[in-house]
Image (cartoon, grey):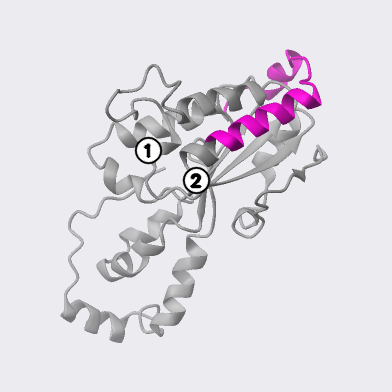
Amino acid sequence: MILYSPGYRILTSSSVERNALESPLLRLPRELRDLIWTLTFTGTVKPACSEASRDSPFSVLVACRQIYTEAISLAGPFLTWSFSCIPDYENFFWNIFDDEGAKYKNRFIHSIQLGVDPSDSYMLAEIIDPGTDDDGDEKTGESRPTFRAFENLTHVELLLSATGVFTDSENEDDEEAEEVESNRYENDDIEDARNNFTKTMERMLPRVRVTYKDFDDSSAMKRFWKTQDPKELSIRVLSGRRERQTALES
């Protein structure tokens, strides 16, 4: 997934006037264009999925200077960055923060969706809480892939599986992973993990809303992740309540 840097984007009045005469799109009223940009940047982005990356919504930003200038402020608030497992999220994190344009790219991240099991949620809570973040930098605490690094983050949704999430990425062999499916977590263990993560986020990142979708096993969670409606995440957000997601048909 490419996040474009601002670089040469300098808009002049002459180019705006020319676009208003020659471009069918840029001749539209600004209100309609803003609606188009909002719809373009509404949905789910899956950086680890090669098929989805070919249709990146960010491609519109390189069309021309005026489109970039108008659309850039809307390229983030309505997108959900979705990962089926923690390793894919970690790769995405380091691809951003190991780059010189980290601060610029950081601004696009407002909502994150992540597939986990209960033990994963405990690990995430430890990364978020600097009191248990032993590997973090003493001054910044941002040397691990923590949600605290995303300054515009407002929503985290965990796709919580009742069994272990084994695959390391979206490209792994799911059938092989299903053969080694772990024992099911008890309901009490799942609820404790959920409460621990929620309370940690409320304490450390109170600006970030936390929601959950629950699955009977990791296979059901992965099927949902692959087939979910890209528009769903922008309109279906349950804050402070538990939503039960039943297994999808194969």
Identify the main secondary structure in magenta: helix
The residue positioned 48% from the left and 74% from the top of the image is 35
Residue 25 image position (x, y, % from top left):
40, 78
Q: Is residue 99 above or below residue 32?
A: above
Q: Is residue 231 above or below residue 192?
A: below
Does residue 172 show up? no
Q: SS class of the residue under badge 2?
A: loop
Q: Position of residue 203 (x, y in %)?
A: 51, 38
Residue that label 1 marks: 149
- Image quadrant in which you'd find residue 140: top left
| Left or right for 141, reference 154 | left
Tell which of 84 and 157 is nearer to you: 157
* SS state under label 1: helix
Question: Left or right: 204 with respect to 242?
Answer: left
Task: Give the labeled residue for mark 2.
Answer: 206
Residue for point 28% across, 40% down: 102
Q: Position of residue 92 (x, y in %)?
A: 42, 34
Is residue 214 visible in the rendered image? The answer is yes
Amino acid of disc 2: Pro
Residue at position x 40%, y 17% in the image: 134
* Circle 2 residues within 10 Å: few <14, some 14–19, many ≥20: few
Between discs 2 and 1, the one toward the N terminus: 1
- The residue segment tinted magenta is 171-200
Q: Nearer the viewer, mark 2 or mark 1?
A: 2
In the image, is 63 to the left or to the right of 168?
A: left
* Quarter of the image where the N terminus is located: top left
Q: Residues within 10 Å of mark 1 (few under 14, many from 20)?
A: some
- The reply to whether the magenta stretch includes residue 179 is yes
